[in-house]
Amino acid sequence: MKRVAAIDCGTNSIRLLVADADPATGELKDLDRRMQIVRLGQGVDRTGRLAPEALERTFAACREYAAVIKGLGAEQVRFVATSASRDAENRDDFVRGVVDILGVEPEVITGDQEAEFSFNGATKELTGRADPERPFLVVDIGGGSTEFVLGDAHPSPTATLPGDATRRTSYRAARSVDVGCVRMTERHLVHEGEISDPPSPAQIAAIKADVAAALDRAEETVPLREAATLVGLAGSVTTVAAIALGLNQYDSEAIHHSRIPLAKVREITDRLVSSTHAERAAIPVMHPGRVDVIAAGALVLLSIMERVGAGEVVVSEHDILDGIAWSLAG
């Protein structure tokens, strides 16, 4: 067994997984899995730069994670940075800070690489079952971007990905588009420095139009409508699922592999976009860091389901973070 640590730093959150990995099978035993919302992508869509306060929030989380990694004795650490750090002019400041704290350089991966990790992390447990049907369309709705990957199985023993001999997959097509819950909120729901509460019909329509255009771009590469099973990842999806399940507190075991019907997603999205900040914050499973962006995230999910023609979404708590950890298993 090999003890590994994987860090996924996105636009909205930074997450850590420390696990014991079996190099022969790629199986993981979680030792510590945690998440902090740091909003690294604050204002990036508007300014093109990472804000100083966003960097400090992220570095504070990195210092906490460094202590956890040291305490558990992880042999290898891999830090993957996604959408916000790809877009920022001052991403070198981010890289230097991470290296100083964790001793590893963050890999600022492309959107397609991000999609591949997400596919591997989300589908490993789904393969080998009679249900659900293949192909899988894995959709990772992040803060700044959304990744689409269409494929049939988890990593195959023969296919390798360019540039990384430890990552294998049988995905067929992948595409990343710049549509995420934070980006859509900042682009369409902020008026005179304040987030609309609740959004106006015109603002909602603007998000839907933006997402529709992004889906058009995604379909140039990924045949979205060929999917037999839609697998949804990340906080917007898991939050909608938690609300749909009527949970009084967040329960990852109950959420993992739950199936949320399209009608329920539509009902919850309508509720979220018509709610005030206080009403959304009062939802028992709502993380404080998602209150302002969940309406946009739910709109993205609903738009995807309608475009794909999916009657339901299979929700996975295993995603890019697990894909990163599996890549270290060797």
Image (cartoon, grey):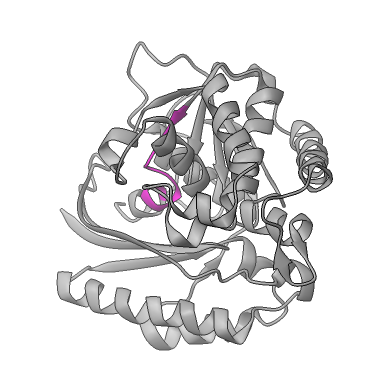
Residue 190 locus on image (x, y percent): 75, 63
Q: Is residue 99 above or below residue 267?
A: below
Residue shown at 70%/31% (left/top)? 222
**Image: magenta residue range:** 314-323
Residue 152 locus on image (x, y percent): 50, 23
Residue shown at 26%/37% (left/top)? 253
Q: Nearer the viewer, residue 221 or 300?
A: 300
Does the segment drawn in magenta span residue 72?
Answer: no
Residue 110: quadrant of the picture: bottom right
Does the segment drawn in magenta span residue 320?
Answer: yes
Q: Is residue 206 left or right of residue 107?
A: right
Q: Nearer the viewer, residue 28 or 12?
A: 12
Q: Is residue 65 left or right of residue 32?
A: right
Q: Is residue 294 above or below residue 49?
A: above
Q: Is residue 189 left or right of residue 10?
A: right
Residue shown at 55%/68% (left/top)? 39
Residue shown at 43%/47% (left/top)? 283
Residue 109 visible in the current orientation: yes
Q: Is residue 69 above or below residue 149?
A: below
- Specify the farthest residue to the top: 130
Residue 25 locus on image (x, y percent): 24, 39
